[in-house]
Image (spheres, grey):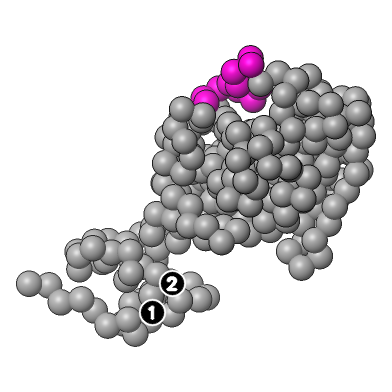
Amino acid sequence: MTETPAPEEIAARLRRAGCVFAEDEAQLIISAAATPGELDAMVTRRANGEPLEHVVGFAEFHGLRITVERGVFVPRRRTEALIREAAALARPGAVAVDLCCGSGALGAALAAAVDGLELHAADIDPAAVACARRNLPGERVHEGDLFDALPGSLRGRVDVLLANVPYVPSEEIGLLPSEARDHEALVALDGGADGLGVLRRVGAEAAAWLSPGGHLLSEVSERQAEAALSAFAAGGLEPRIATDEDWNATVIIGRRP
C-alpha cells in the first residue's frame, strides 16, 4: 500500500517547481485527491505547470467553488469587480446572460447575488459549454458564436448582459504566463489585432438584445478603455467606466437608452 507523503514533502516538491504559494497549494491538492496515486499524479501535473485550478478541478470565485475542467478558462479574481457592478444593476427576477461564459463562473456568481435571476449562458467552445453545464442549469447553457447561440425569445429582454470576452491582442498571447498560454483555450484569450475584436462584435449587437435600460458589462485593460467606450457608443449604448484599483480591474458598462 502506497503511503501518502507528508504535506511538507509535497510543498517542497511544488516549491522546487517554482510554485510561490507551495504550502497552500499542497493543502488544496491533498484535500482534492482521493488516493495516494491520484495525489502523486496531481502534484506532478502542477509541478509541470498546469494551472492549480485544473489540477484540483475547481476555482474559488466570488465566494463560490466553481468547477473548472482541463482546457477551460480559469476565472480571474479581478473579474469579481465586474460581478459587483452587475449585481448593483440587476433587480430580483432580472433576465441575465453570461456571454463567452467559459466555466459559467460569472453567471453563477450573479445568480448567487441576485434573487430569482433568469440566467442564460453561452460559449463557442464545446469544452467550456460542458463545464458550464456543471455549474449552471444545463438547459440554459447554449453553444454557439456569441448571440447566435441564444434563444430568439431573449431578444429585447436581457436586463444584464455579462460579456467577459477575450481581450488579449493576438501578438501578446506569447507573453502570457504559461499556465494561460499552454493550458487555456486560445479562443478564450485572443481578442484579435488590438484585443477588442470580439468586444466590438458584442457592442454592435447588444442593443438589440438588451431591454430598455438594460446594461452590457465587459472587462478590458486600462489602455483599451477609451477604445472600448467608443465601441459601446457606436452600438447605440451609453457607456461609462468603472474601476477597481485593488484588483487593477477596468469594467466598461453600456446602458441601452
The residue under the point 43% across, 80% down is 23
Where, quadrant-wise, is the N terminus in this rendering?
Answer: bottom left
In this view, the mark in front (1 or 2): 2
Q: Disc 1 or 2, which lies upstream in sequence?
A: 1
Give the image location of residue 137, x and y in percent: 47, 36
Residue 147 within the segment the image draws in magenta: yes
- The residue where tag 2 is placed is 25
Q: Nearer the viewer, residue 231 or 192?
A: 231
Residue 242 location (% of width, % of height):
85, 52
Name the residue that disc number 1 marks. 11
Dot 2 amino acid type = Glu
What's the residue type where badge 1 is placed?
Ala
Q: Which residue is painted at 52% across and 57% down in the image?
A: 64
Numbered-mark total: 2
- Mark 1 is surrounded, within 10 Å at the Cα level, by few (under 14), some (14 to 19) or many (20 or more) other residues, namely many
Residues drawn in magenta: 142-153
Task: Specify whether 32 is left or right of 255.
Answer: left
Between residues 253 and 257, which one lies in front from this camera angle?
Answer: 257
The CA distance from mark 1 to mark 2 is: 7 Å
The magenta stretch spans residue 201: no
